[in-house]
Image (cartoon, rainbow, N blue to C red):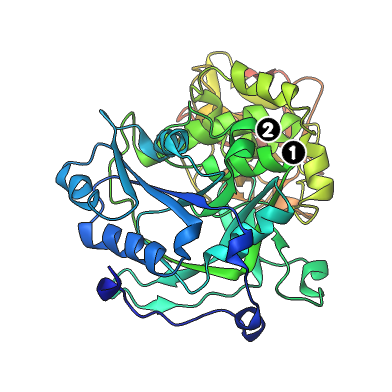
């Protein structure tokens, strides 16, 4: 297979290149690659790079999990390669459950997950295995270089970044903390709040003990946050190893379908499960960013909660203090319950609107989603990233959605009176529901039922 190898630039630092690795002292790994309708050439490139750039004694097997691809011959043809084993699902299971099936079939003490569109760089494996030998409860990830999806050019990435997330539970890359930046030895592991996704190594016994993947999560999305929270909070660590480099093709869109709903609905279900199990009381910040998730059916989480208790996992407040103190906890909804703002059978409904749209109402459906609002301690009426606002305190002024401002904002300050009026702070004008079912300002009148709003908690 060496004749099939491509040449990639060695993107490691000079210091990393100077390190010597004693592969004879390291334990071997099973490499697990799941795929669905992956191009044969791309999958072969991944396998060849594993074989050619790893000490043979450290690769016990390469397990391909075919997630019911349209063409089963891709896997059967590759099974003739040395050390390659192929498992084919009898139906679409998705990345998450396919990886668990691969882990179940693995025999090496360490398992290494790769995506099916990767290129391993020089000495990629030894630093990962070396770190696990020193910290058996570490989940370790390489620095992920970029392979251009249009021409497959290999481009080095910075090793001065780590994984993070926003309260919508969407992964993001971010710079290192000041403490991490100032470390004297740039080859030492980088503690990362979150892994990017599919590229990491972990002891097989620790992977099983700490709960593997959540088997009720579907296809793809959110699993990297779930396993990162779980490992950190249940007495392990998540680390990026600067001297390990693996290239990855970052696609512009998903190349496969999502059974059971589109990518958005699957991601919402998965992240809702993450929030319900791991975020504790902080899940309200997730719902503030993703109010539609309140109506998502997230399934049974009792087994994951039992796992959390059995392992003696720490609370999410510990994670925020010790792992990710840089994550800003919003102050605008501290202690603010999620509510419906209603008049009789009509509720304020964003109707999927954006900044600039008028506030309006719709028949109350009690299903959360676009009707979930937060009336915050600072007097904001918030839905996701938009807040109710008015440009001037005057008769017939429209109340519209505006991008929320965390600091002072005259246009977004509201007070709810004991009679149920929502008053533009410092004025005599209140919300009134008009005949078009849109909300505007009128002189406050507590005798006018069109100005009386009930707040009912979810």
Image quarter in which the N terminus is found: bottom left
Question: Which residue is rendered at x = 66% and y = 46% of the image?
Answer: 394
Instruction: Specify the farthest residue to the top.
Output: 344
Q: In the rendered image, which residue does mark 2 sit on?
A: 278
Taking depth in this image into account, of 375 and 367 the one nearest to the observer is 367
Q: Please say if the residues under marks 2 and 1 sit with CB atoms less than 8 Å apart.
A: yes
- What secondary structure is found at the residue carrying circle 2? helix
Secondary structure state at the residue bearing disc 1: helix
Please tell me how crowded label 2 is: few (under 14), some (14-19), or many (20+) other residues with Cα within 10 Å: many
Front residue of this view, candidates 98 and 297: 98
Q: Decide if residue 31 is on the left or right side of residue 308.
A: left
Residue 62: x percent and y percent? 38, 50
**Which of the 4 image quadrants contains residue 229?**
top right
Residue 209 vs 151, above or below: the answer is above
Pair 2/1: label in front: 1
Quadrant of the snapshot with the C terminus: top right
Q: Position of residue 421 (x, y in %)?
A: 73, 26
Residue 452 has which mark?
A: none
Disc nearer the start of the sequence (2/1): 1
Please give left or right for residue 121 compared with residue 440 in the image.
Answer: left
In the rendered view, tell whether residue 6 sits above or below residue 434. Answer: below
* 289, above or below 250, in the image: above
Residue 383: x percent and y percent? Answer: 60, 38
Marks 2 and 1, Cα distance to the nearest angstrom? 9 Å
**Crowding near pointer 1: few (<14 within 10 Å), some, many (20+)?**
many
Looking at the image, the residue that sits furthest to the front is 24
Can you identify the residue that label 1 sits on? Answer: 233
Residue at left 42%, top 32%?
Answer: 218
Residue 409: percent from the left, percent from the top?
A: 75, 54
């Amino acid at each position: 297979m060496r004749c099939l190898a491509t040449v990639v630039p060695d993107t490691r630092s000079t210091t990393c290149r100077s390190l010597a690795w004693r592969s004879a002292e390291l334990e071997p790994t099973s490499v697990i690659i799941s795929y669905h309708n992956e191009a044969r050439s791309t999958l072969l490139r991944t396998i060849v790079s594993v074989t050619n750039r790893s000490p043979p004694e450290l690769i016990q097997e390469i397990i391909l999990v075919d997630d019911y691809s349209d063409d089963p011959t891709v896997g059967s043809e590759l099974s003739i390669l040395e050390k390659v084993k192929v498992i084919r699902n009898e139906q679409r299971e998705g990345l998450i459950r396919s990886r668990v099936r691969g882990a179940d079939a693995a025999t090496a003490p360490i398992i290494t997950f790769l995506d099916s569109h990767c290129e391993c760089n020089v000495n990629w494996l030894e630093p990962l295995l070396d770190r696990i030998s020193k910290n058996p409860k570490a989940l370790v990830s390489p620095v992920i270089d970029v392979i251009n999806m249009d021409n497959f050019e290999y481009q080095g990435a910075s090793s001065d970044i780590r994984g993070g997330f926003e309260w919508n539970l969407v992964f993001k890359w971010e710079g290192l903390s000041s403490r991490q930046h100032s470390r004297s030895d740039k080859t030492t592991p980088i503690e990362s709040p979150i892994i990017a996704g599919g590229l990491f190594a972990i002891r097989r016994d620790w992977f099983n003990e700490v709960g593997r993947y959540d088997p009720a999560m579907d296809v793809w999305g959110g699993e990297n946050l779930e396993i990162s929270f779980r490992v950190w909070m249940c007495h392990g660590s998540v680390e990026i190893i600067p001297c390990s480099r693996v290239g990855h093709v970052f696609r512009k869109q998903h190349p496969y379908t999502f059974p059971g709903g589109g990518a958005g609905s699957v991601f919402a279900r998965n992240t809702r499960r993450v929030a319900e199990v791991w975020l504790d009381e902080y899940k309200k910040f997730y719902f503030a960013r993703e109010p539609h998730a309140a109506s998502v059916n997230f399934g049974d989480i009792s087994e994951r909660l039992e796992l959390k208790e059995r392992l003696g996992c720490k609370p999410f407040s510990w994670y925020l203090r010790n792992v990710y103190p840089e994550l800003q906890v919003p102050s605008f909804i501290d202690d603010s319950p999620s509510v419906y703002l209603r008049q009789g059978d009509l509720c304020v409904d964003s109707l999927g609107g954006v900044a600039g749209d008028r506030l309006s109402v719709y028949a109350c459906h009690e299903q959360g989603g676009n009707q979930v609002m937060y009336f915050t301690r600072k007097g904001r009426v918030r839905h996701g990233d938009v807040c109710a606002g008015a440009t001037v305190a005057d008769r017939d002024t429209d109340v519209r959605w505006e991008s929320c401002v965390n600091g002072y904002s005259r246009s977004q300050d509201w007070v709810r009176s004991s009679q149920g009026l929502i008053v533009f702070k410092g004025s005599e004008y209140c919300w009134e529901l008009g005949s078009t079912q849109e909300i505007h300002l009128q002189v406050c009148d507590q005798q006018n039922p069109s100005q009386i709003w009930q707040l009912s908690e979810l």
